C-alpha cells in the first residue's frame, strides 16, 4: 500500500480538507501561474485525445469529454468499462510525474487525462476504486485552465457533501480511505465556457 511521506503531511497539514473518512488535500498553486498557459497549450496540442463512447440505455453515446491515457509500458487499465492501452510518456507528463513523486513521496506509473471542452463537458459520480488501483489509492489530480466546481458525496451518510472549486494550477490529492467512502463528480455548468485540462496521476498494480 502506498503512503504520503511524513514530510508532505507536515508541510501541507493546513491544506487537508475537513472530510470524515477521507484524506483529501487541495493545494491551489501547485503549478506556478507563469507556467500554466504554456503547459495547457502544449498538452492540448500534443496529447492523443480520443472521443470515447459509453453505453447508456443500450445505446452508444459520446463521453462528455475527451480522454487519453499515458502509462509505463505493459500496464493495461479498465476504466469506464473500457480497456486502455497506454501511450508512452510525453516530456511534459514526465516532468509533472517527477514533481508529484518528489512532493508526495508516492509513486505514479500512469496518468489519465481529461479535456473538458466547455461547461457541458463533465464527469458523473464515481469513485476511483478499480481493482488495479489497490486498497487505498493515492490519486494526484492536476487542473489547468477554466476553474470548475468539483463535489464529493459520502456513500453511506447521504447528507455528507462537500463542494469546492478547482482553480488552474491546483493539485487535488486523494488518499487513504477516500475512494472507499466517497464518490466525486465534475458537474456540467452553464457558466464555464473555456476548456479545462485535468490530469489524474495513479499507480496501477
Ligand atoms: O476532472 C476532474 O477533476 C475529475 C477527474 C476524475 O475524477 C477522474 O479522472 O477520475
Ligand atoms: Fe475520479
Image (cartoon, rainbow, N blue to C red):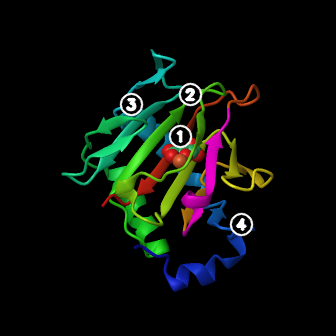
**Disc 3 target residue:** 49
Q: In this rendering, would 173 be left or right of 191?
A: left
Question: Sequence-wise, which precedes: disc 1 or disc 4?
Answer: 4
- Label number found at residue 24: none
* Circle 4 SS class: loop
Residue situated furthest top in the rendering: 59
**Ligand 1 lies under 8 Å from the Cβ of mark 3:** no
- Total labels: the figure holds 4
Q: Position of residue 141 (x, y in %)?
A: 53, 54
Crowd band around label 1 with a 10 angstrom C-alpha radius: few (<14), some (14–19), many (20+) = many
Residue at mark 1 to residue at mark 4: CA–CA distance: 23 Å
**Disc 1 target residue:** 197
Q: Nearer the viewer, mark 4 or mark 3?
A: 4
* Circle 3 SS class: loop
Q: Which residues are magenta?
A: 176-187
| Residue 166 seen anywhere in this rendered image of the structure | no
Rendered position, 55 above or below 26: above
Question: Sequence-wise, which precedes: disc 2 or disc 4?
Answer: 4
**Disc 2 target residue:** 117
Q: In this rendering, would 165 be left or right of 173?
A: right
Judge by depth and name the residue closer to the eye, 146 or 39. 146
Residue at mark 1 to residue at mark 2: CA–CA distance: 8 Å
Q: In this rendering, would 137 be left or right of 24?
A: left
- Label number found at residue 17: 4
Amino acid at each position: 500500500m502506498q503512503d504520503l511521506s511524513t514530510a508532505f503531511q507536515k508541510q501541507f497539514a493546513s491544506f487537508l480538507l475537513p472530510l470524515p473518512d477521507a484524506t483529501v488535500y487541495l493545494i491551489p498553486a501547485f503549478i506556478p501561474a507563469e507556467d500554466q498557459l504554456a503547459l495547457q497549450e502544449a498538452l492540448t496540442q500534443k496529447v492523443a485525445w480520443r472521443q470515447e463512447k459509453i453505453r447508456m440505455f443500450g445505446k452508444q453515446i459520446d463521453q462528455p469529454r475527451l480522454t487519453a491515457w499515458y502509462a509505463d509500458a505493459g500496464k493495461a487499465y479498465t476504466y469506464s468499462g473500457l480497456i486502455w492501452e497506454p501511450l508512452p510518456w510525453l516530456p511534459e507528463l514526465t516532468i509533472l510525474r517527477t514533481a508529484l513523486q518528489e512532493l508526495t513521496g508516492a509513486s505514479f506509473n500512469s496518468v489519465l487525462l481529461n479535456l473538458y471542452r466547455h461547461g457541458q463537458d463533465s464527469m458523473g459520480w464515481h469513485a476511483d476504486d478499480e481493482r488495479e488501483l489497490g486498497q487505498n489509492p493515492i490519486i494526484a489530480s492536476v487542473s489547468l485552465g477554466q476553474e470548475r466546481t468539483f463535489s464529493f458525496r459520502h456513500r453511506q451518510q447521504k447528507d455528507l457533501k462537500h463542494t469546492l472549486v478547482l482553480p488552474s494550477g491546483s493539485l487535488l490529492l486523494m488518499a487513504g480511505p477516500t475512494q472507499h467512502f466517497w464518490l466525486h463528480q465534475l458537474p456540467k455548468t452553464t457558466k464555464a465556457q473555456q476548456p479545462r485540462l485535468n490530469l489524474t496521476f495513479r499507480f496501477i498494480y
